[in-house]
Image (cartoon, rainbow, N blue to C red):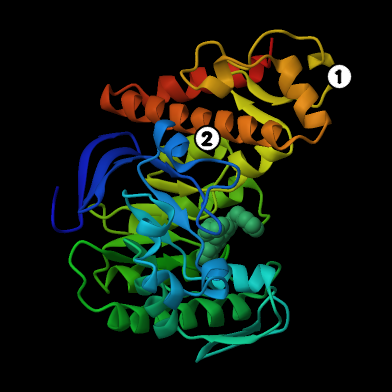
Amino acid sequence: MSESFQFQLKKTDGGARLGEVSMPRGTIRTPAFMPVGTVGTVKAMYLDQVRETGADIILGNTYHLMLRPTAERVARLGGLHELIRWQHPILTDSGGFQVMSLSGLRKLDEKGVTFKSHVDGSTHHMSPERSIEIQGLLGSDIQMQLDECVALPATPKEIERAMEMSLRWAERCKVAFGNQPGKAMFGIVQGGVVPELRVRSAQALSGMDLKGYAVGGLAVGEPQEVMLRMLEITLPELPTEKPRYLMGVGTPDDILKSVARGIDMFDCVMPTRSGRHGLAFTRRGKVNIRNARHAEDMRPLDDQSNCPASRDYSRAYLHHLVRANEALGGMLLSWHNLAYYQELMQGIRQAIAEGRFADFMAETQENWARGDL
Ligand SMILES: O=c1[nH]cnc2c(CCNCC3CCCCC3)c3[nH]c(NCc4cccs4)nc3cc12
């Protein structure tokens, strides 16, 4: 196991990249899908199940953990890895994005974000330095800079202001992070859907020589083709020898098309959140298990899968559990969806390794279009 943080670009196939991030706690095979942990758990899942699906890394939820049980308490309890018993890499977000989407009264200025906790209404101030301190207390392996993801629609002036402040915050986070061997701090490219702002943000962050780069400010309601166009504009400005992380993305189709343009890492609540609501992602497209057509269908979701949730339970049973709002329904569908996402990532990595990613992408999309049997 390497004592440092290293990214190795192993192969490219068109714009798609096969790589590995090596860290003291383990290796991340890229392109990688990172399941979202919330308050230290991937909702409705045991972490050894998450590991079994093929996850090399999970996300820790800074916003929730800083409010409850607090970063200081997590540190006193030995850090997040000890607390949740996950001994592989953990990436934590800065907490800023969720402040903007979850908390009440909030103010954002050069110093940072001031907000009221949705848990108990207490007031919190999070500066770039405090965000890095919190992520350090959690024991995070990959820490994200504090940034401002401006809510769309926004004027170019507003987008420019937020992008430039995010760059200043990136510098402050880099200083606060200092030199932590085996760990990394990633910058986040902003700039909305304005090409020249995207280029300026990516070029400025590249100049900071960070360990990895996230593309932020996307998957916030813009059409898929606009998101993809922004990747085509942004990624050429980022160093090829560093990992690229597209934040909050996405559906299986988003992932295929973003891998084709050079993205290495993804996170999304989609597989777990939609699983809890009865939506299954399968190799033959989406299946809404609540639909009456499954009520007496004895087949499993996917008898080819090595995941028990996909292989051993009938659709009729899953339909019943979800209709009855039984917790086991959401658990089994979350498990199935995470397994499907990891199977998709494994297929992508294999296809790039064999130089047939374009064919894999076309076949996969055709199977989705064919729809469920
Ligand atoms: O610019 C950004 N800066 C920082 N974070 C962003 C995120 C959150 C990524 N997931 C964090 C996880 C950390 C652990 C807990 C769960 C989230 C985004 N998510 C989306 N789209 C999906 C979206 C989800 C909700 C609204 S849009 N676009 C995003 C853009 C940014």
Give percent across and percent down for residue 158: 62, 80
Tag 2 residue: 338
Depth check: 225 or 196 in front? Answer: 225
Residue furthest to the front:
77
- Real-space CA distance between mark 1 and mark 2, rounded to the nearest whole angstrom: 24 Å
Residue at mark 1: C-beta within 8 A of ligand 1? no
Depth check: 116 or 236 in front? Answer: 116
What residue lies at 70% left-to-right and 74% top-to-bottom? Answer: 118
- The numbered dot on residue 114 is none
Number of labels in the image equals 2
The amino acid sitting under disc 2 is Leu
Q: Quadrant of residue 11?
A: top left
What residue lies at 55% left-to-right and 83% top-to-bottom? Answer: 161
Identify the element where label 1 is drawn: helix
Give percent across and percent down for residue 359: 42, 19
Q: In the picture shown, does residue 300 fall above or below 35?
A: above
The amino acid sitting under disc 1 is Ala
Q: Quadrant of residue 331?
A: top right
Q: In the picture shown, does residue 276 fall above or below 211?
A: above
Q: Is residue 136 left or right of residue 297?
A: left
- The numbered dot on residue 292 is 1
Figure quadrant, ligand 1? bottom right
What residue lies at 46% left-to-right and 18% top-to-bottom? Answer: 306
Residue 366 visible (yes or no)? no
Rate crowding at label 1 as few (under 14), some (14 to 19) or many (20 or more) other CA atoms within 10 Å.
few
